[in-house]
Image: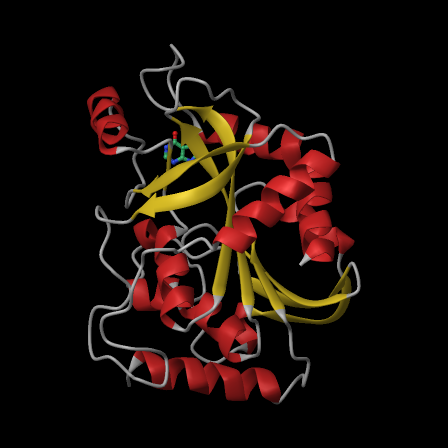
Amino acid sequence: MTDYERVMRAVSSVREKTDFEPDIAIVLGSGLGALAESLETVCALSAEEIEGYPVSTVSGHNGKLLFGYLEGKKTVIQQGRIHYYEGYSMGEVVLPVRLMCALGAKTVILTNAAGGIDPTFKAGDFMIIDGQISTFVPSPLVGANDERFGTRFPDMSEVYSRRGRALLEKTAQELGIKAKHGVYLQTTGPNYESPEEVRAFKILGASAVGMSTTVEAIAARHMGREVLGVSLISNLAAGLGGKVLTHEEVKEAGDKAAASLTRYIAAVVKNI
Ligand code: HPA
């Protein structure tokens, strides 16, 4: 079965349960689940209820799609992201985002927790993603191309739309948030980077590093959708903060930022 067929099978399986057509899709990063509480949910589907949807066997944190209204806008939220480091193929990793787009989403908002590389970044900052480096992970488009998703060789010169970045900046200013801007680089994980890698990524132009997002952005752009991205800088990248990195630190930063990120993303959705 091709990735296209797998996504279409998932679409049929969702359509047996809801006819909700979202305009906006949001992917929540580590520790950023609080946004789901602001959604007026009309339908919640667990990974197991959607045919072909990757079910996490590793963490026990099973994925969910939540359909409903956020600031009055028809929205679907993906809770429980699928990570490449869990052993899924990139086709599986991007299945949820493709599914949300196939169900109707025209705008995709990607969030994540990331390690800050730019020397002006502090833990707790928000970074509006202006661009990305996906070179260190396999493309989700490898394999047979189905033109019903998009063209074989899609352009990636404006992954994060100019309009979306301006909207993120304007909304941050309205809320009194001093958002940073930068380039997000994805690694496969699950290990954090070495300080040498962090120095190399800096030379390459990365402002922040994490283990998700760029492949989802590529899959959404392949389908012609508009992509917006926000990173929570949960920590300074290895070698820059003077201490070892732990997943607990990343989760704690997510918990601390949850309320303000939730307010921010909800306001962004309102302004779309
Ligand atoms: N590196 C990679 N991924 C991350 C980090 C980091 O420092 N922080 C949160 N996700």
In the rendered image, which quarter contains the N terminus? bottom left
In the rendered image, which quarter contains the C terminus? bottom right
x then y, percent, for residue 206: 32, 33
Q: Can residue 80 be seen here?
A: no
Q: Residue at the location (79% across, 64% down)? A: 72
Image vertical order of residue 229 relative to residue 174, above or below: below
Q: Nearer the viewer, residue 59 or 88?
A: 88
Q: Residue at the location (29% across, 83% down)? A: 146
Image vertical order of residue 98 relative to residue 136, above or below: below
x then y, percent, for residue 170: 65, 42
Q: Nearer the viewer, residue 7 or 175?
A: 175
Q: Residue at the location (43% across, 57% down)? A: 82
Q: Can residue 33 be seen here?
A: yes
x then y, percent, for residue 103: 56, 79
Q: How is the image coloured?
A: secondary structure
Horizontal relation, residue 50 to residue 243: left or right? right
* Ligand 1 occupies quarter: top left
Tell me the quarter of the picture where residue 193 sits.
Answer: top left
x then y, percent, for residue 68: 73, 68
Image vertical order of residue 94 relative to residue 20, above or below: above
Q: Residue at the location (29% across, 64% down)? A: 155
Horizontal relation, residue 239 to residue 143: left or right? right
Number of numbered tags placed on the structure image: 0
